[in-house]
Amino acid sequence: MTNRERRNLRTGLLFILPWILGFAMFIAYPLGASVYFSLCDYSVLKPPVYVGSANYEELATDPVFWQSMGNTFFFAAIFLPLATALAIALALLLNTGVRGMTIYRTIFFLPSLTPMVALGILWMWMLNGEYGVVNHALNYLLRPFGVEAPTWLQSTTWAKPAIVLMSLWGVGYAVVIYLAALQDVPVQLYEAADLDGARWSSKIWHITLPLLSPAIFFNVVMGLITALQIFALPYVLTNGAGGPGRSTTFYTMYLYNCAFRYLRMGYACAMAWILFLIILGLTLIIHRASRRHVFYAGG
Amino acid sequence: MPAVDDAKSNRAFAGKRRTAASSLAIHVVLLCVSLLFLFPLAWMISTSLKPLDQTMRMPPEWLPDPIQWKNYVEAVHYIPFFTYARNTLIIAVLGTLGTVLSSAIVAYGFSRVEWKGRNTAFIVLLATMMVPFPVTMVPMYAVFRLLHWIGTYRPLWVPAWFGASAFNVFLLRQFFLTIPRDLSDAACIDGCSEVGIFWRVVAPLSRPALAVIALFHFLYCWNDFLGPLIYLINQDTFTLALGLQFYQSRQGGTPWNLLMAASTLVVTPIIALFFFTQRTFIQGITMSGLKG
Amino acid sequence: MRALQVLGLENSAYAGRALLAAGVALLLCGCQILIPQPQDEYVNGRIRITYWEKWTGFEGDAIKQVVNRFNEMQDRIYVDLITMSQIDQKALIAIAGGDPPDLVGLWSSGLPQFAEKRAVMPLAPFMERAGMRKEDFIQVFIDLNCYRGELYGLPTTPATMALHWNKRMFREAGLDPDRPPRTLAELDEMAARLTKYDAQGHLIQVGFSPGEPGWWPWAWGFWFGGELSNDNEITFDSPENLAAFRWIQSYTKRYGAAEMRRFQSGLSTNFASPQNAFFSEKVAMELQGVWTANFIHQYAPNLEWAAAPFPSAVPGMENVTIAECDCICIPVGTRHPDEAFEFMKFLCSQEGSEMLNMAQQKFTPLKKVSPAFIKNHPNEYIQLFIDLASSPHACHTPDLSIWFEYLDEIAAAFDLVRFGLDTPEHAVSQVQQRASVMWKRAEASIERREQAEGKATP
């Protein structure tokens, strides 16, 4: 290493020292311990007993594990594209500079602020099959065609879409980030496009979206990490049961139940590290794809 | 840098002067979507003002009859509301200060200094977000127990001072990467040390991004339920999120109207916070945007 | 231009610094004043006992009453009552972490797990020293607190379940309002007469539905003479349990799966409200617990109702019920177990128990009850619930450490059959299969652990 490189290394490490210390004190041991626990029979109340790969082998044949994985991927696959499209669309709308923008922005961010316990109850209320407002409105549109609105949380087919719907309410965070990124698109580009007579849709496709792509990348990665770990909302809605008929048993919920309800912490740790590998893999894939599609304006 | 004003964004989107018709169209769409988003909150407030037997009436009714303002007074006495609010504030302020400071420092190290192994370390940082929390809960408890911190607030705010929030570090890093090199080079030529560059050049430019971090972390602390549940023991030390749980009884019947009143009270400070600070950070991150 | 900006912003950097300094100062002050103090072992010379309980609202007030009374009537011990939500999770972590409370209130269904892992103390020695006898309690509640024959907790607030029916709806349907169904077949027949449809063929009123309230999906087998397990194995796949699931399916077939789901989703999920299906007269008969009377008085005071034992499908098998209770236990690792037990003794004495259960509107787990308790009790059918508790057919959750896993399997099967998504035969055999796997695994785990512990002890 050259002198300069050595100096930079020292400086870099010094700057991230708080994180290194924090990692050593608070994070390393729990992470390492959970790797060890995944190879053990550990009930929390008793010391762990080493069992090798037994947990992982059992997972391979556990139907509930596979069902929870399927449920989670289903959720992520539907939620992520919808959330991204919705967040970008909202950000574009909120960037048009019409009056009252600050109020609109606050309103769109509101659902992300509401405590989960209130949100859960509100949603159960609104999605009630008979009297919920959602079905009230839907039936208005559907009954003329002889179709009935679904019974949402009571139905094994519609419970997951219901959760997707509820989760979409929380796009406020992503909107804020997109909004900020949008502010920075150079006006000259739009003006040049106007000179060429471009329509607004091609302006969005060829100017806005590419310049927004780093923000999209950030939000998609974060969205993936959180979507695959979805826990709080379905837990509150089904009181941890993941019903009906296990249709809303998501990966982290099953993991949590294994750890704290069935006292099989070792098994849960095995699940955790499998999920970790999946998320890591997907993130790296997105990162690779980003090289082609994400445009860094550079500084 | 000129402050962003709405006129700029006007032109940025439409390119030419907008007609009254398209303005109206946008307003209509925004209003419709706003109504959709306001729904949960509106229902929350509506329920909070109802007498208990009207709360879960089917079909649902929007207007309480009569409007029961005293629900709020009752809600505040059902649990030690203000004590819990104070406790939550303490944790949130201490945590937010720590997060802003340490995330900035750590993010700087990951973005403005070129050093070997930087990318690997960054991936490790990201990776810590990929492990579901239930499996780290028990060992973390063991760590804090060793430090004799169980029952105190320390497990809730001290880790924030050590860059524990990978999300914030990631976000700030993205932002720092977009600040032009020439600025730090200029300062370097003036004889600034790296710390100097950080303190005098990058940090002041990032004030708005830091504001976003502060807001997000404050919000997180305000609503955090699991952390306080596990680490706090003495009832006087509980937080608002824990307090909200007390309205929910297993078989005793939940006073929904009081719960909604309490929830409304819990949400209001955050709404106010967001409303008044949004200008700062939307303006600010503006300066270079979130480019890679 | 950029340099100017940098310079211009310099000034605000000072403001930033000042803010930082203030923050650090606040921090240092905060460290001193605002951090909660660790708990003192002694309060005014009295030994402090921490007692974690789950009850809030009026149930919480009830236990507070008892705790205050105990603290008043002696001056050696001070019981510090702390209300905890998610009490099983919190207790688990605290016990595992080695700083548990001195007393914890668990649910009877969760006790076997803690007992099997020896996380709570066996109470036989305490009982002996205090001169208390198991026989003083109603047998089923002692059974609920035992694991493999050893007593690990004492019952605090018991409950049994019975058939509740709507007299007005009976009258309307031409049935004798004071005569409940005596067999399950009768119940099915009466339910048919109590069911009403509207002009579009939608259900508007239902005589009975196994899913309402659907709180005990695991227990229906009992009314058919079935068992969940015996000493050696899971016995879910038995003709009796199968019959129970077929009976559940019969209701789905009767109403039609889609229609039933629609009707079910229109029912309020909020038990404690006037919109409760039974209180709002949408359902004529249901299986419910001793606490129901209290809620009827509060939310549907004009409801004409009565209670009787829920009929069984086996001729001659009467007074079948589900018994459950809240328990109080002493976690392993506490500093003052003897003082903790002294409070338990008071809580489970006639005075303490009657005080607690009168306020919670349940009955006491003790065999001996003062006549005044029954006379003044707000639940007009309290004697029925007490009698049911002593019935030989009072069934309860098995003392299996894998109970929650087993329960979740049964609940999933119940949902699938109820929604017409699976046949009773397949669902039942699936549960049997998976639960047997769980059983074997748990046995292997215990063996492994005992070996490991055997090696460890010198």
Image (cartoon, coloured by chain):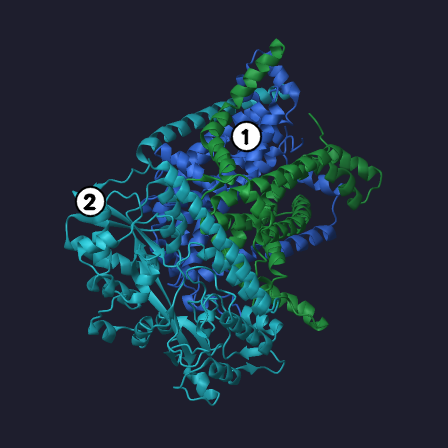
Chain colours: A green, B blue, C cyan
Q: Which residue is mark 2?
A: C47
Taking depth in this image into account, of B259 and B276 the one nearest to the observer is B259
Is residue A103 in view from this perspective? no
Check the residue under mark 1 and report the chain it is in: B
Lateral position of residue C60 relative to residue A1, left or right: left
> In which quadrant of the rendered view does residue C26 lie?
top left
Q: For the residues marked 2 and 1, what is the alpha-carbon distance in whole angstroms?
A: 53 Å
Tell me if label 2 and label 1 are in contact, CB under 8 Å.
no
Q: Where's residue A81, x and y in %?
A: 68, 48
- Which amino acid, mark 2? Ile
Q: Where's residue B191, x and y in %?
A: 57, 11
* A16 relative to B244, above or below: above
Q: Nearer the viewer, mark 2 or mark 1?
A: 2
Q: Which residue is mark 1?
A: B207
Taking depth in this image into account, of C152 and B143 the one nearest to the observer is C152
- Which amino acid, mark 1? Arg
Q: What's the residue at 44%, 77% (across, down)?
A: C312
Task: Indicate the quadrant containing the N terminus of chain C: top left, top right, bottom left or bottom right.
Answer: top right
> In which quadrant of the rendered view does residue C149 lie?
bottom left
Q: Secondary structure at mark 1?
A: helix
Crowdedness near tag 1: few (<14), some (14–19) or many (≥20) residues, C-alpha within 10 Å? some
Q: Where's residue A216, x and y in %?
A: 67, 39
Crowdedness near tag 2: few (<14), some (14–19) or many (≥20) residues, C-alpha within 10 Å? some
* A159 relative to C283, above or below: above
Check the residue under mark 2 and report the chain it is in: C
Task: Indicate the quadrant containing the C terminus of chain C: top left, top right, bottom left or bottom right.
Answer: top left
